[in-house]
Image (cartoon, helix red, strand yellow):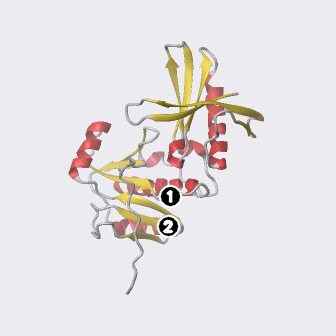
Amino acid sequence: MKIRRKVPKPPRSKPPLYVIGFSSSPTPREFQTWFDHEYGGPLSFKESPTGEESATSPLMASHGPWSAWMLLSAPPVQADAWQQRLEWRHTACAAIGAGPATKSNAIDVVLHAARLARGVALLTEGTAYDVTTLTYLNPSDWTDRPLVQFSVRDHVTVVHADDIERQRDWFYTRGLSKFGLDEIEVFRPVGLPSHTITENLFDIADELLRRGQSPNVGSTILIPNLAASIRVVRHRTHPSADTPLILREISW
């Protein structure tokens, strides 16, 4: 008896990494042709867990060892929900999320998902929304890099907000959670130059991604680009309008 390999199911409990709004979706074949031409391919689609081969069913899109799930045409109920949430004109959308990843290949898996999102945005001339960083991307906004030229700024943002209660500035990242890490935050007195703090957080985020894990509370980590060490002060969950932020406060 032939044993069929079980196809991994898309992680329905987690939100997608990207949602792309458009007026008409590409077919799986059209998308495969574009991807193979752009990145050398071959891109392969595995049938959905339900066994249906349809643009409205989730597919696992694999390129080499990396996989991501794609919903090339979301059902109308989902498309309407995203349209209301994002307040855009698009009546149809696609959704893309990262596939299974380990500590050693999480960066490549997220890059693969980003390439898929870029492809859908270019083919449809639509608008992509990075669900984690809350960033909108038009087709011309994408920066495509080889896998060996990873840039943390393509996937992570630094937010500057006011901590009114304690009268201080609050800086935190959005995007490390794509890679399975907690976001990082730091508090500073009001009035200090924000640019320097933002740049430092990008360097710290880059080092944490290369290490592949969130540091323990109380630990000290050397950041080579800063020629300085950071200390992890505490771990907390902060309520957010979209999804709670899991944060590790640092100091340096």
Counting every numbered tag in the picture gives 2
Mark 1 is on which residue type?
Answer: His
Q: What is the number of the mark on residue 112?
A: 1
Residue in view at x 64 percent, y 27 percent: 197
Q: Position of residue 184 (x, y in %)?
A: 58, 34
Residue 192 figure quarter: top right
Image quarter of the N terminus: bottom left
Q: Position of residue 29 (x, y in %)?
A: 35, 70
Helix, strand or loop at label 1? It is helix
Q: Position of residue 102 (x, y in %)?
A: 56, 57
Q: Position of residue 151 (x, y in %)?
A: 60, 47
Helix, strand or loop at label 2? It is strand
Residue in view at x 51 percent, y 41 percent: 175
In the rendered view, tell whether residue 54 sits above or below residue 170: below
Q: Is residue 206 visible to us here?
A: yes
Name the foreground residue: 110 vs 124: 110
Residue in view at x 55 percent, y 40 percent: 182
Left or right: 66 as drawn, with respect to 85: right
In the rendered view, tell whether residue 73 sits above or below residue 29: above
Q: Is residue 91 visible to us here?
A: no
Residue 90 figure quarter: top left
Q: Are marks 2 and 1 in contact (CB under 8 Å)?
A: yes
Name the foreground residue: 100 vs 92: 100
In the rendered view, tell whether residue 95 sits above or below residue 200: below
Mark positioned earlier in the residue sequence (2 or 1)? 2
Residue in view at x 53 percent, y 45 percent: 155
Left or right: 129 as drawn, with respect to 148: left
As measured in the structure, the alpha-carbon distance from the residue carrying label 2 to the one carrying label 1 is 8 Å
User: Label 2 belongs to which residue?
Assistant: 63
Q: Give the residue at the far right of this rendering.
A: 227
Mark 1 crowd level (few <14, some 14–19, many ≥20, 10 Å Cα): many
